[in-house]
Image: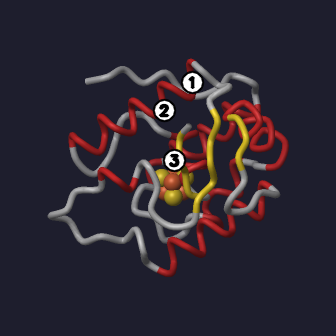
């Protein structure tokens, strides 16, 4: 089982191997790869810091408990018709994302995110809507 907060359900779609540190990237690549290759993995939707936040570098300013991040979590969950405490497979989450998300939703959901300008998250939503699953990302 993987524990994920609301907005990370969206971040995983655009993930291409970028992140806050080598340890953070290694962990996210491992979780992303698990969900990509074993989509029946159960995801527990949690409130606050999750299995990705667990490897946020301690020497960088932590934003995992910031109010705007919680607002982003809630906005993504609302869009997907999910709530904290849900348990469902990654396959079920992808199906909801393909049905309910559009690339043009990303800027509104994620306006305060420093990764937004890369455009990879819109690409990830388009890919999911096209039934092509998560981008392949190699371990470094
Ligand atoms: S823009 Fe930021 S918060 Fe939104 S999905 Fe991409 S990485 Fe995640």
Residue 109, compared with residue 9, is above or below; it is below
Contact check, label 1 and label 2, Cβ < 8 Å: yes
Q: CA distance from mark 1 to mark 2?
A: 6 Å
Q: Residue 109: x, y in percent?
A: 63, 65
- Name the residue at the bottom extreme: 67
Q: CA distance from mark 1 to mark 3?
A: 21 Å
Residue 8, compared with residue 83, is above or below; it is above
Residue ID for mark 3: 119
Q: Residue 91: x, y in percent?
A: 72, 30
Q: Which is nearer the eye, 70 or 43? A: 43
Residue 116 visible in this rendered orientation of the protein? no
Q: Secondary structure at mark 3?
A: loop
Contact check, label 1 and label 3, Cβ < 8 Å: no
Badge 2: residue crowd in 10 Å (few <14, some 14–19, many ≥20): many
| Quadrant holding the N terminus | top right
Contact check, label 3 and label 2, Cβ < 8 Å: no
Residue ID for mark 2: 32
Residue 135 visible in this rendered orientation of the protein? yes
Query: Which of disc 3 and disc 1 is earlier in sequence?
Result: 1
| Quadrant holding the C terminus | top left
Q: Residue 79: x, y in percent?
A: 77, 60
Q: Which is nearer the eye, 76 or 90? A: 90
Residue ID for mark 1: 36
- Name the residue at the left extreme: 59
* Residue 72 in the figure: left or right of residue 94: left
Badge 1: residue crowd in 10 Å (few <14, some 14–19, many ≥20): some
Q: CA distance from mark 3 to mark 2?
A: 18 Å
Dividing the picture into quadrants, the one containing residue 7 is bottom right
Label 3 CB-ligand 1 distance < 8 A: no
């Amino acid at each position: 089982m993987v524990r994920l907060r609301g907005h990370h359900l969206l971040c995983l779609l655009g993930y291409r191997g970028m992140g806050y540190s080598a340890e953070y990237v290694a962990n996210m690549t491992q979780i992303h790869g698990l969900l990509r290759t074993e989509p029946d993995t159960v995801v527990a939707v949690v409130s606050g810091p999750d299995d990705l936040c667990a490897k946020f570098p301690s020497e960088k300013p932590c934003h995992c408990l910031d109010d705007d991040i919680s607002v982003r979590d809630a906005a993504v969950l609302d869009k997907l018709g999910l709530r904290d405490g849900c348990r469902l497979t990654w396959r079920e989450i992808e199906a909801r994302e393909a049905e309910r998300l559009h690339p043009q939703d990303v800027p509104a959901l994620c306006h305060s995110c420093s990764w937004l300008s890369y455009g990879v998250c819109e690409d990830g939503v388009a890919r999911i809507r096209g039934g092509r699953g998560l981008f392949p990302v190699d371990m470094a």
